[in-house]
Amino acid sequence: MLPSETHIKRVVIENITPEIEGGQFPIKRTVGEHVVVEGDIFADGHDAISALVRFRHEQDQAWTERAMVEIGHDRWRGTFRVEKPGTYHYTIEAWVNGFQSWYRALHRKTQAGLDVTPDLAAGAAAFEQVLPRASPDDAQQLQQWAQLCRSEPDLPALLRDEKARTEIDARLMRYRTPEHSTMYWAPLNVVVDPLLARFGAWYEVFPRSCASAPGHHGTLRDLAQQLARIADMGFDVIYVPPIHPIGQTARKGRNNARRAQPGDPGSPWAVGSEAGGHKSIHPELGTLEDFQYLMAQARALHLEIALDIALQCSPDHPYVRSHPEWFRSGPDGSIQCAEDPPHRYEDVYPFDFTSPQWPALWSELKSIFEFWVHQGVRVFRVDNPHTKPFAFWQWLIPALKRPWPELIFLSEGLTRPGPMTYLAKLGFTQSYDYFPWRNTKAELTAYYTRLTTGEQRQYFRPSLWPNTPQLLPPLLQSGGRPAFIMRFVLAATLGATYGIYGPAFERCEDCAVGPGSVDYLDSEQYELRCWAWDAPGHLDDLIGHINRIRRSNPALESNDRLLFHPVDNDQLIAYSKTTADYRNVIVTIVNLDPHHTQRGFVDLRLGSLGLDADTPYLAHDLLTGARYTWQGPRNYVELDPQKLPAHLLRLEQPPPSDLPP
Amino acid sequence: MLPSETHIKRVVIENITPEIEGGQFPIKRTVGEHVVVEGDIFADGHDAISALVRFRHEQDQAWTERAMVEIGHDRWRGTFRVEKPGTYHYTIEAWVNGFQSWYRALHRKTQAGLDVTPDLAAGAAAFEQVLPRASPDDAQQLQQWAQLCRSEPDLPALLRDEKARTEIDARLMRYRTPEHSTMYWAPLNVVVDPLLARFGAWYEVFPRSCASAPGHHGTLRDLAQQLARIADMGFDVIYVPPIHPIGQTARKGRNNARRAQPGDPGSPWAVGSEAGGHKSIHPELGTLEDFQYLMAQARALHLEIALDIALQCSPDHPYVRSHPEWFRSGPDGSIQCAEDPPHRYEDVYPFDFTSPQWPALWSELKSIFEFWVHQGVRVFRVDNPHTKPFAFWQWLIPALKRPWPELIFLSEGLTRPGPMTYLAKLGFTQSYDYFPWRNTKAELTAYYTRLTTGEQRQYFRPSLWPNTPQLLPPLLQSGGRPAFIMRFVLAATLGATYGIYGPAFERCEDCAVGPGSVDYLDSEQYELRCWAWDAPGHLDDLIGHINRIRRSNPALESNDRLLFHPVDNDQLIAYSKTTADYRNVIVTIVNLDPHHTQRGFVDLRLGSLGLDADTPYLAHDLLTGARYTWQGPRNYVELDPQKLPAHLLRLEQPPPSDLPP
């Protein structure tokens, strides 16, 4: 009938942040970041309490402790730093602090002129009670303090000294009785990824279009030739669509024609042919040695190669013959192709993830990732994860990250908010986001405020893509070069991680396959292209310039502290990012109208930028090099999209004498 | 390495409401109320899903099911009604609905003019697959449907009929495979209390002041004489301060004097003397038979008697001698009195709830409640619960409610918000709230909006007290009779549950013991009073009138749907309560200034009151009987505190001909 505990824990810990659904899902950080833990912590009555954040890396046995402090209204805060990839566990421990409670009562009684002899005697007894468990050094101290309490009729001077009390408190803390401590009930975890999980610029390119002359099928070695150029532009990740053999059966032709013509290369997402499946390389791209060569070249340039894993098969995939039970079959026994009624995708067979043979299937699919990890791949872009059971990812990603905590998985799950964010909770490192469909100031402000201030920011890392091979948004079709620059600046500054489908973006390719479509005309998905890499007028220089700005301004490395500022013109958007110490303050102002010059007054929230409203400050446009001296929150801006549709300002408040006149 | 489940559950259920901290704490309802359960429910891919709310009373074995419907954006909703006191368990079950998914694809393909023969064959096979598990009746149907699918080349007419499809769906639902269903992970519970837990008017009275002549110690039988009068005023609960023997040692005198004079009766909260402890009755109040007589009289008038349980002892309590180990003792072995340094309360010894002997102590304390429950008591007011360990209440209240689910516990835990609401989470049925310290329109609006719309409303039931024997708020000291009426109307209409310390309130007693104090002069806590029960000018009639209005207007039975309406005068506050069907709409408008007439325009949010803005409606003042015909949201009000500081309007939109001109 009585509670089963043998000791009563008097302290309550609740409303912890960050905590995702009672600790069911981990939060995410990158190496070197902090976790700020808060909780409501209180006890019955009026005693003083103490609280700690405790944390440990999954491979360490010992917990490390950090003191928490009350920030008001029973809310406590503590911070710890994560040092290496992998999973950290963290929790809160809190207890009634007898020493502090005792001292507080003593102090109040002394001030009221009451006799504190009995209280001092009680304190002495309490010190002595700890003796049997204390280290020799601590025991000596405890005895001294006890003696002090017994020998003085009034509050001992030592105790009046806050520093001395802090030391006593710290020594006594070592002998607290864990059976009286409250440990927070839920298991809390933080998955720690490499910096690239948070901050990186991605460049998508089809190796088969990297040949130096038209009509030739590009190879992995051709792509290797491009790496230096892409690295020079400041990219961190080269993402290549599936590099596996492409099926022949029901192969799609140019511009998604139902039937391929002789010579059409087919879609790389129709994975598998007689030449092999997900662990093979398309023969026309090269060999595993060529891939190794590519990886080595990339490594030398500090580039990561991101593979695209599309867990589906062409009808010619070896799995189809060896494991027909992994696919769904109709009443006549034939394997069913992908469908989104009334559409049918005859060149693709989806796996049946819930077939009775799922254990074998899942194990095999896991081995695909393992194969490529063994080839040195650390970054995966996962195609359509939202059409596979969530339980699969929830099992797969932690299983792969356990031995290789540095792995990065980008979710392409561009679907409704529920499933999309759930994939991030389950373990995806990054996610494509709704950037392509957020165009107006109101849309961008609402969306990125939510992503960067709500609970989602603890586990959902957006990757902002202005275009992909499957998506040429209407604005890019109609806005010309200014629209490309504008969307690029937005992606690269709103998002610590962003990416472009590079060759088409650099060239401001804006032809859709037809009116109302968002598909590229002559899409690389269905044919070879031959890009004139060095033709003039490309955005390469600007892209490289902005990537260099990203790398030299730490404010842009994170989405924390993204803040929007009012502008009295709806076509102008202004937002800032700062480092936690305000030593790097970047304000981006973008003209969202690719067709007209827009003017307005921006009202900077100076307090949130660490700037003093009464002192002039320097606004240094990192795009043009121009330097303006601004003062106060309200400043005029004018952006001509034909020149440059954006300011990328670093704000600094130097001594007035250092400001340009 | 693989997930341990043998079947893959494709549906995800998350963000359930109501749910308190992952189901760690129950929500609360009263008998006959509904629980509206919502959740984000989705699966991978594009299949149709179905979801149910399942619930059962703790004493029932079988679960009852209610269908959930999608209300948009993957959010689903289902409702169930709780019928009897006790704890109900509830959860959500959801699964991929094969029949609906199949039909949706079939329908789309038919519309696109595609051949659906293979799909119909697949459907027939699916129907037949269920046969072995089906009841004879269902089996017959299933065979007919299968035949239909096999015999027609096109979508069978039967399936085009939504009603027929619903029937098929309902039959198939019986044969869903639970191993593929997702059950929500957290255990969710709702504690169901009697209506009185939600809706009731309390009257606090000291039996010892119920004697009919001055200088006599009132008795329980004297209180019994008052019951009819109090019942006539429309009260539901008579709450009496502790009725146990009062200690002699360190007894407090009148007006909290440190020493009692001969004849001073002492504070009832200093429980225990040679005459007994918490299971005894103060000899001057009467005997257990007298208490039984009081209970019988109360029962006949449909009144509950609420006992005040103060878990603390006077130095003369029998426990002090028989169980000194249940108290805290100083270094010299003497038992320590209650302290809030520098204050000492020598007439009270607190229990040491965490003493090594806590199991025996806790069991004994539980037996106190059990003793009074066996005497017929169903309502307890618990003194200072926030100074006892939370673990004690978390154990005690469910342990007492298991055999007696109709018990009501009012928490007097008037402390900081964290511990105060935590006590409600742990099981207290009702709680005193901050009403005495919420006076301005802004304060009242913010506080009661939060209490009635935030998560708290699921478990925290406020009890609004304009005064208590320990609290005469400044406004009542300075505002005279208008202030008493104004605060009474606020308490009785903002709160479905409210209470008054009756005799002093009725008489508008407004003398504090000194300037700046909120203690009554000549407080009943320390002396006998003799109230002239029938003297004229009391608020009895008005109180009775308002209690009758509360009983005949179901909108006032609940705090759900409390809504504040703008008034262009900060001294006027307007708010409404409605039944869920808008058949009862009550708008209360109060002048918060007890000294001056206040005028203004109230802007009613008609849409939230179920009223049509273009049709006139009747505003019937239930306090005065006056009837106004109003139209549109904006209406003029003027309230003279010397006459009546409030309108209590019932709004009705009758046919225009029925409206007064």
Image (cartoon, coloured by chain):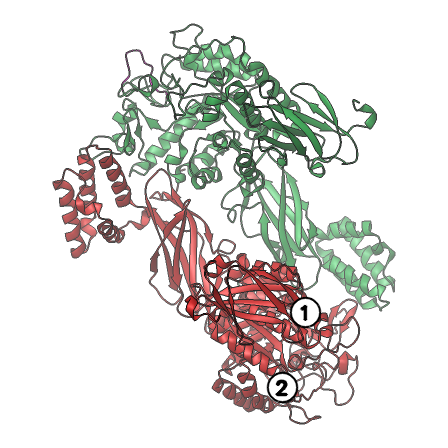
Chain colours: A green, B red
**Label 1 or label 2, whichever comes before in sequence order:** 2
Q: Amino acid at mark 2?
A: Pro
| Other-residue count near label 1 (Cα within 10 Å), few / some / many at <14 / 14–19 / ≥20 | some
Residue name at image x 26 percent, y 20 percent: A249
The residue singled out by tag 2 in the image is B207
Which quadrant holds residue A610? top right
The percent position of residue B637, horizontal first and vertical second, equals 60, 66
Residue A265: tell me if it is visible: yes
Work out whether B320 lies above or below B535: above
Q: Quadrant of residue B150?
A: top left
- Residues rendered magenta in the picture: A259-268
Q: CA distance from mark 1 to mark 2?
A: 39 Å
- Residue A173 horizontal/vertical position (percent): 71, 52
Say whether residue A387 is left or right of residue A553: left
From the viewer's side, name the closer residue of A569 and A545. Answer: A569
Reading the image, the residue beneath label 1 is: B597
Residue A597 percent across, percent down from the top left: 60, 23
**Element at badge 1?**
loop
Left or right of residue B508: residue B618: left
Let me know if residue B465 is in the magenta part.
Answer: no
Q: Have a look at marks 1 and 2 and say if they share a chain.
A: yes
